[in-house]
Image (tube, rainbow, N blue to C red):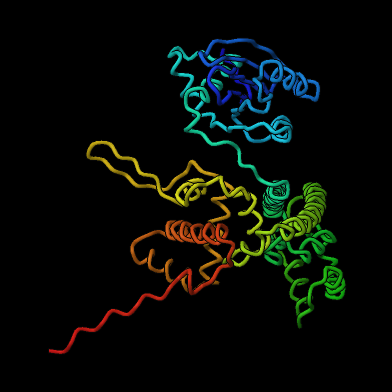
Amino acid sequence: MRVLRRPCARTSVTSLEEGLLRITCGIDWPERHHDIALINADAAIVSRARIGDDLAGFRRLTELLAEHAGPDGPTSIEIAIETDKGLLVAALVAAGFTLFAINPRAVARYRERHGQAGGKSDPGDATVLADILRTDRHRHRPLPADTNLARGVKAIARQHQEAIWARQQTVNRLRSLLREFYPAALAAFPILTQRAALTVLGAAPTPQAAARLTPSRMETLLRRAGRRIDSGLPERLSTQLRQEQLRQPAEVEQAFGVATAGLIDVIVAMTGAIDALQEQLTGLFTRHDQAQIVTSMPGLGTVLGARVLGELGDDRSRFTDIAGLCGFAGTAPITRASGKMKIVSARYIRNQRLADACHWWAFAAITKSAGARAHYDQRRAAGDTHNGALRNLANKLLAKLWHCLHHGVLYDEATAWPTPKEKPQPAAA
């Protein structure tokens, strides 16, 4: 039987100068250990070691690097790693090492250069990672040298998005549960994340409890939730919740009611956490000197702008041209050509979070920018689907953002979408 393990991340280290040692570090997640392999310019293994995933392990790694480093010190040794996350990565970056994030798929292909039998081991993969930088360093890019503020924006933006996704999963569970025994609640409150819906359903989590909700009690709950009391609203909601409907047995309904109250408490707590994260996100993002440029783009506010800035970073040397940026975001198409076959399709190997942010950015931009709307309509008229037209528009918007960031200027609608000059009319015969 084949035993499946959790994926591992590994680090390889090489030097720039011929003759100096190349060092490879493998990170084995299940055992919380890192395999280290040291190789020289001739690909000969100098030493192997295994360190723990803790402060003592990091100290052992730096001592090992210092022991085999050249005259320029241990930080002259470059590191290749399959992941750009984790405490070890953060510690190595803070110590001044240069890291290369190598895609695990690329590591698997490099492994096949050394054998076709399918063998795999953590120390062997560490050696493969060292060889990647030894032979093909020019084909890989180091981790961007983003500022700590940009890294903070990225971290809080990702956690804010994760919290929203987690709340939506809980809301979906609540919706499915209410459909089982309390469909009137869904008719009265289609949007379950609203404070009024959570307050009222928290007070009446079952049809039996809803039968006691008089219009005056409903008005009190709505005021507690901060909802505007329109004429006839309490009576309408009270009538919807108390309408005749199919009922579960009393014992089953009571059990569902307890589960509903629990899910509502979880959603309320998640909403508070999301608000706190958004407050922190706003504070960090507005402190960044590129925030004003980012939010000058049509369709980018604080939250979406922070997601875009966090994923792009603020290292201007990260992308040498706009093509690399658009490929990273997945807005540029990918071409597959062989013989007489040529296929141009959407790019799915990309930064998924940046691609998601660009999609919603383009969707918002078509209502904020006349030029963006005209470009979207043009792509739709040419036969693009809705998502295809948004992806093409996002590709254009990224190019304009890249220009604004590199030149330190704010977005200008007239400059970004110049009005085409009218063609001269032919003279009359």
- Residue 236: percent from the left, percent from the top? 74, 75
Please tell me whether residue 305 is drawn above or below residue 129 in the rendered image: below
Q: Is residue 226 visible?
A: yes
Q: Could you say where residue 1 lies in the image, as x and y percent from the top left?
A: 56, 12
Most distant residue in the bottom direction: 428
Residue 199 percent across, percent down from the top left:
82, 63
- Say above or below: 291 vs 166: below
Is residue 108 depicted above or below 146 in this figure?
above
Left/right placement of residue 353 relative to residue 264 reads left
* Residue visible at 67% across and 16% down in the picture: 68
Q: Residue at x 67, y 35 (%)?
A: 85
State left or right for residue 200 relative to residue 26.
Answer: right
Numbered-mark total: 0
Image quarter of the C terminus: bottom left
Name the residue nearer the viewer: 198 or 105: 105
Report the residue that reaches farthest toward the left.
Answer: 429
Q: Note whether 303 is above or below 21 in the view shown.
A: below
- Name of the residue lying farthest toward the front: 71
Query: Residue visible at 73% across and 50% down?
Result: 149
Q: Quarter-wise, where is residue 144 in the image?
A: top right
